[in-house]
Image (cartoon, rainbow, N blue to C red):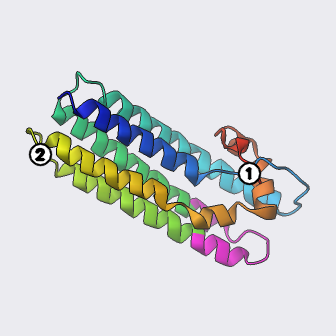
């Protein structure tokens, strides 16, 4: 199982990169008026989901220990991908529940963000299914490498709709919310 450790570390790195991308919220703050309430609701609802993604990262990283069997790695990775899928689905629901941000094209921004979050959730579910199908024999490393490549591709696809949602007045309002600051994502620029 010598090869499993580096491959599973790729999984953990790609997974954490995806989570950071989701909420690369701007740290700028400015009087944004009515968007503050909207941003607070969204940030408060997203925070627990980001915690779940962090927990999934931790379980995948833990599974990458060279002492773990292919069965243990497979089980941990599958559970981790399911947690991430569920977290993205919950984020989509949170953005949908908050309604359109009170800015120009807010309805379009919200709709696009929900669609993107649902799409990412589906892709993580697909990774879970692919992981569940991995053989745990000597072909395990090969299969795990394939899953890691899909995960890397998912992370690189970007969350364009979310980035759009987090621009301008909405992003500034989100950057002022304590629950968004807790994520450590306020280091980004506007």
| Mark 1 vs 2: CB contact within 8 A | no
For label 1, the residue is: 26
Q: Position of residue 179 (x, y in %)?
A: 69, 43
Residue depicted at x 67% and y 70%: 99
Range of magenta residues: 94-112
User: Which residue ends up furthest to the right in the rendered image?
Assistant: 31
Mark 1, Cα crowd under 10 Å, few <14 / some 14-19 / many 20+, is many
Specify which label sits upstream in the sequence, 1 or 2: 1
Decide which of 43, 144 is in the foreground and name it: 144
| In the foreground, 36 or 6 | 6
Q: Residue shown at 11%/45% (left/top)?
A: 135
Q: Which residue is mark 2?
A: 135
Nearest the camera: 93 or 154?
154
Name the residue: 23% across, 21% down. 67
- Residue 181 belongs to the span the image colors magenta: no
Quadrant position of residue 111: bottom right
Mark 1, secondary structure of its residue = loop
Q: Which disc is residue 53 wearing?
A: none
Residue at 47% in and 51% down: 87
Element at label 2: loop
**Is 161 displayed left or right of 123 in the figure?**
right
Q: Quadrant of the C terminus?
A: bottom right
The secondary structure making up most of the magenta span is helix
Residue 70 position within the rendered picture, expressed as x and y whole percent measured from the top left? 17, 34
The image quarter in which residue 153 lies: bottom left
Query: Looking at the rendering, in which quadrant would you find the N terminus?
Result: top left
Question: As drawn, which residue projects farthest toward the left?
Answer: 137
């Amino acid at each position: 199982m010598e090869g499993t450790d580096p491959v599973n570390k790729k999984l953990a790195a790609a997974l954490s990169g995806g989570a950071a991308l989701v909420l690369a919220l701007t740290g700028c703050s400015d009087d944004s008026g009515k968007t503050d309430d909207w941003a607070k609701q969204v940030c408060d609802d997203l925070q627990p989901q980001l915690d779940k993604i962090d927990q999934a990262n931790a379980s995948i990283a833990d599974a990458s220990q060279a002492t773990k069997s292919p069965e243990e790695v497979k089980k941990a990775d599958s559970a981790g991908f399911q947690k991430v899928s569920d977290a993205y689905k919950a984020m989509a629901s949170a953005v949908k529940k908050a309604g359109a941000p009170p800015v120009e094209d807010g309805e379009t921004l919200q709709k696009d963000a929900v669609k993107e979050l649902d799409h990412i959730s589906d892709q993580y579910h697909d990774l879970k299914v692919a992981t569940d199908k991995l053989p745990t024999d000597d072909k395990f490393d090969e299969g795990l490498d394939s899953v890691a490549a899909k995960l890397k591709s998912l992370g690189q696809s970007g969350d364009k709709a979310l980035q759009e949602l987090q621009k301008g007045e909405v992003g500034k309002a989100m950057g002022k919310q304590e629950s968004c600051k807790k994520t450590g994502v306020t280091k980004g620029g506007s």
